Amino acid sequence: MILFYFRKYWWVVSAAIIALAFVIPYQVVLVLLFAQIIAVNLVSFRIRRYLKPERNVKSLRNLLVLEFKDLLESYGISCDFPPRGDYSSVDLIADIFGEKTVFSIREGNDEIHNSEVQSLAASLPKHGAKHGVFLVDGLLPIEAKRLAESYGLEFKRYQKYKEEVQERLSSNSNVCHVCGRLIDQNQKEICRKNSELLGGKSYCHEHFKEIIDKTKAETS
């Protein structure tokens, strides 16, 4: 914000520098004016870079990626961003029920090029992924959808896919009945051995411990 005001009111700064000519040598005033010209140009360059359309679109995409990552992690699913220097179209890598999935998540107005579809398809073996999914927060571009499906990729609406994932995770027997987090095989076996106490439900370690502690307190 300061940079915007500096560029907008450069003439006020110039007037203040010129006014200093009455109290300091004119050579110093000229140096200050020259320095101001350089500073204004540098600020303008930085603002132009910040306002590039690609940067704004990327920011919108980042918000969707972070939102989806938070959703998956709330169910205990491990998520990673692609490593630095990875220039593929992959935005997120998730391990869902032991199967890796690579996601490319797009804001509704993004144009999806053929090369990006091919890039996501090529990234599957690179990341050891079994599934590749394009998620679009808006209308599905038909051409890109057909190409993606020809490579064996899924192409879905962002909101609908979120709902499908939530329903799938919530109904899965490998998730905690309270918080919805995934539980490992050992914890599932512990719950099975205590199925009478737990009413046949599965719980993560924390909520299992809460129930056990509560039961002990009630019986003591």
Image (cartoon, rainbow, N blue to C red):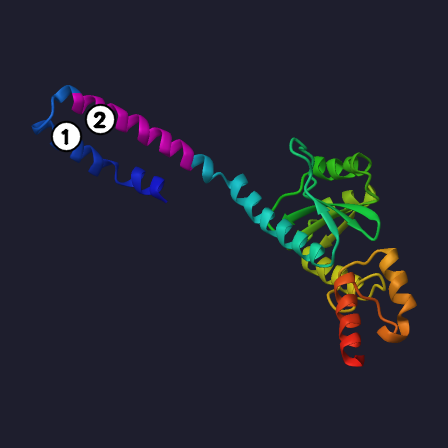
The part of the image, by quadrant, that contains residue 6 is: top left
Q: Residues within 10 Å of mark 1 (few under 14, many from 20)?
A: some
Q: Position of residue 63 (x, y in %)?
A: 58, 51
Q: Residue at x 68, y 59 (%)?
A: 159
Q: What residue would you read off at disc 2?
A: 33
Q: Position of residue 166 (x, y in %)?
A: 74, 62
**Looking at the image, is 23 positioned above or below residue 160?**
above
Q: Which mark is residue 102?
A: none
Give the left or right position of residue 51, taking residue 37 as reference: right
Determine if residue 74 is in view.
yes
Quadrant the N terminus occupies: top left
Q: Which residues are magenta?
A: 28-47
**What kind of residue is marked 2?**
Leu
Asked if the residues shown at circle 1 and circle 2 are in contact, with their CB atoms under 8 angstroms apart, the answer is yes
Please tell me whether residue 40 belongs to the stretch shown in magenta: yes
**What kind of residue is marked 1?**
Ile
Front in this rendered view, residue 115 or 146: 115
Q: What residue would you read off at disc 1?
A: 18
Give the left or right position of residue 36, taking residue 181 as reference: left
Q: Main secondary structure of the magenta part?
A: helix
Cα separation between marks 1 and 2: 8 Å
